[in-house]
Image: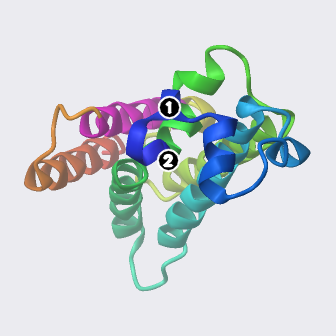
Amino acid sequence: MIDEAGLAALSMRKLADRVGVSRTALYHYFEGKDALLCSIAEEGFELYDKALTQVSKDDVLNQHERAVGYVERYVNFSVEHASYYELMFGKTIWKESKASESLLQTSRASFKRFVGIVERWQEQGLVAKDDSPMRKAQVIWAALHGLSRFMIDGVYIDRQSRTEMIQSMAKWLLHEAK
């Protein structure tokens, strides 16, 4: 429903009608729309982590290829799962401080895993050690998020441009270590 009409069009009533349950049945599982959105965002983090950790464990790739693959997977995940991505990182949940405790834990654990990846990249000489792994992860994530938002928001929609920008970002990211 979110993909079809956006977040604003989603309501508990419409969702209940769509899935064929009573309008009060959803409240047995979710206190309200915010709780439902937090649950969907958590599901998004699970998909996100699965997609991104898979490339960091790919034994066929060397460390450089894994790092490039991470950038590619991140941006592609954001574009291909834009509704999840919006809930995971957009203002709907975060700006109004509506995140559930479970979502806070899930999102923090996800970022902690990324900090660990950046730390490994630093140890392997792929990324500069000029900042702590935490600070470097924040900056890298901000760059990845910015590129992703450009793609999602339609600033860059051409697949070739996306591929070239992903490659350029990976070069920039990995060039820092030199």
Location of residue 150 in the rendering, given as x and y in whole percent from the top left corner: 26, 33
Residue under pointer 1: 9
Over which residues does the magenta segment extend? 136-152
Q: CA distance from mark 1 to mark 2?
A: 8 Å
Amino acid at pointer 2: Met
Mark 1 touches mark 2? (CB < 8 Å) = yes
- Residue 93 visible in the shown view: yes
The verdict on residue 140 being magenta is yes
Q: Give the left or right position of residue 82, taking residue 94 as reference.
A: left
* Residue 116 in view in this figure: no
- Left or right of residue 23: residue 86: left
Task: Where is residue 66? Give x, y as percent.
Answer: 41, 67
Spot the residue most to the bottom: 60
The residue lying furthest to the top in this view is: 96
| Res. 1 mark | 2
* Residue beneath the point at 40% across and 53% down: 126
Residue 115 falls within the magenta-colored stretch? no
Q: Nearer the viewer, residue 41 or 10?
A: 10
Reply above or below: 132 against 110: above
Q: Position of residue 118 (x, y in %)?
A: 54, 48
Crowding at mark 2 (Cα within 10 Å: few <14, some 14-19, many 20+): few
Mark 1 residue crowding within 10 angstroms, few (<14) / some (14–19) / many (20+)? few
Indicate whether 176 appears above or below 119: above
- Viewer-side residue, 44 vs 136: 44
